[in-house]
Amino acid sequence: MAAQRVVEVPKAAKQTSRVRVAVRLRPYMVKQDDKGEGACVRGLDSQTLEIINWRNATETLQYQFDAFHDEQATQQEVFLSSVKPILPHILKGQNASVFAYGPTGAGKTHTMLGGPEQPGVIPRAVREVFNLVKAKEKEDNAWDYSISMSYLEIYNEKVLDLLCPSAQDLPIREDKDRNILIPGLTNTPLTSFSDFHTQFLPASLNRTTASTKLNQRSSRSHAVLLIKVVRTQRAVQQRVQTGKLYLVDLAGSEDNRRTGNKGIRLKESGAINLSLFTLSKVVDALSTGGGGSGRVPYRDSKLTRLLQDSLGGSAHSVMITNIAPEYTYYFDTYTALNFAAKSKQVINKPFVRETVTTPSVQVKRSREEQEAVGSGEP
Ligand code: ADP
Ligand code: MG
């Protein structure tokens, strides 16, 4: 088949319901690259990256996003540019959601959770929510604020309470005001950031240990942290407003069927992870203004149903697509980029692999080049 020389028409013009898309490229890791092929993706500027075109190695494909964070981007930079701006809305009774999307191993958990040295979006966002509330209380005492959290997992289309691990699959309901809620889900009041830290960390560790036992469960499940800010007006007729912030570490977007012995591709990817597949459709429908049919398929999966009042509409949503630079990830990266991109362009020039600087890798690669190994198709 001929190489695509298409300049894709950018998706519909900016709308309030559009999901902002950022892409984060994690650093190159020697241990993820047994063949020593180097990187196949690199950043060009703060919105653009390029990936080698496997159909024709003399070409690259350039993609544009709302934001591109390169391999040197710090946790702080990602938070400041992609997450912090949406947080003030939560204090005004509006909803927001932040997702980490991408294949397993590309940096979703690093981005969302991070570690003690490099805290990710979750601890930074919660700290910021506490700071914002403190500042609001100082500047104006017309409202009282309270903050609480819930933490759940969606696995095999079951909703499981991570703060009460013995609980069964929980139902998702909608009230008369179209708010989505889960009756019975633990909702823990939080008094401070350190309170959050002590309550959330053990629960998130629970999930990690359980996952290694249960055969890669963490890569097949969605971890959903909900931070709720309720404000009550001190006037006689008390008004109450609730703002919700969903922080989601999604299941791996890799196509597991391709890793089967024969590289079989099935037609329908929906069956593998219904929630992830439906999320793609919802984000697509939102960015194209209802996808032509005008219908956003929130009800088709648990995750999208849960997020219905916090994704699209008047909500503020950001998807951080995590990608890895090694060839091992090529097809999963390619798929994730095609989903995330605002536009794509074929550039006719060879991809210079200048991003690889690790000496051992370069030695290994040049040896392979001497053996004249390598084809265009990974
Ligand atoms: P995922 O959750 O998508 O499966 P992880 O967050 O577990 O991926 O990342 C895989 C590995 O790469 C981890 O060891 C993680 O610490 C590391 N990593 C991911 N992103 C970065 C980054 N931006 N900087 C440094 N290390 C990273
Ligand atoms: Mg992970």
Image (tube, helix red, strand yellow):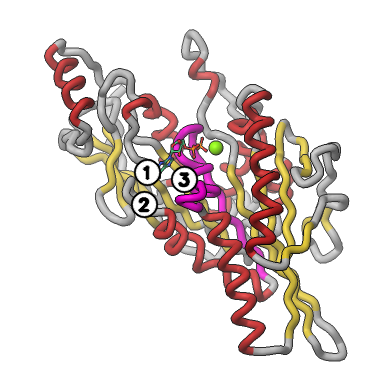
Asked if residue 16 lies left or right of residue 195, the reply is left
Residue at position x 68%, y 30% from top? 210
**Image location of residue 132, percent across then percent down:** 59, 75
Q: Which residue occupies the extreme left position in the image?
A: 370
Examine the rendering and report whether any part of residue 351 can be seen. no
Nearest to the observer: residue 353 or residue 115: 115
Name which residue lies at 63% across and 78% down: 134
In the rendered view, tell whether residue 254 sits above or below residue 14: above
- In terms of sequence position, does the residue under pointer 2 or pointer 3 come before the other? 2
Looking at the image, tell me whether mark 1 or mark 3 is earlier in sequence order.
1
Mark seen at residue 47:
none
Amino acid type, residue under disc 2 in the picture = His
Neighbour class for label 1 at 10 Å: few (<14), some, many (≥20)?
many
The circle on residue 25 is 1
Quadrant in which residue 239 is drawn:
bottom right
The residue wearing badge 2 is 69
What is the distance, in whole Å, between disc 1 and disc 2 at their CAs? 6 Å
Residues at marks 2 and 3 touching, judged by CB atoms closer than 8 Å: no
Tag 1 near tag 2, CB within 8 Å: yes
Q: Is residue 247 left or right of residue 5?
A: right
Q: Secondary structure at mark 1?
A: strand
For numbered disc 3, what is the local secondary structure? strand
Residue at x 64%, y 40% (from the top left corner):
205
Res 321 label: 3
The range drawn in magenta is 94-119
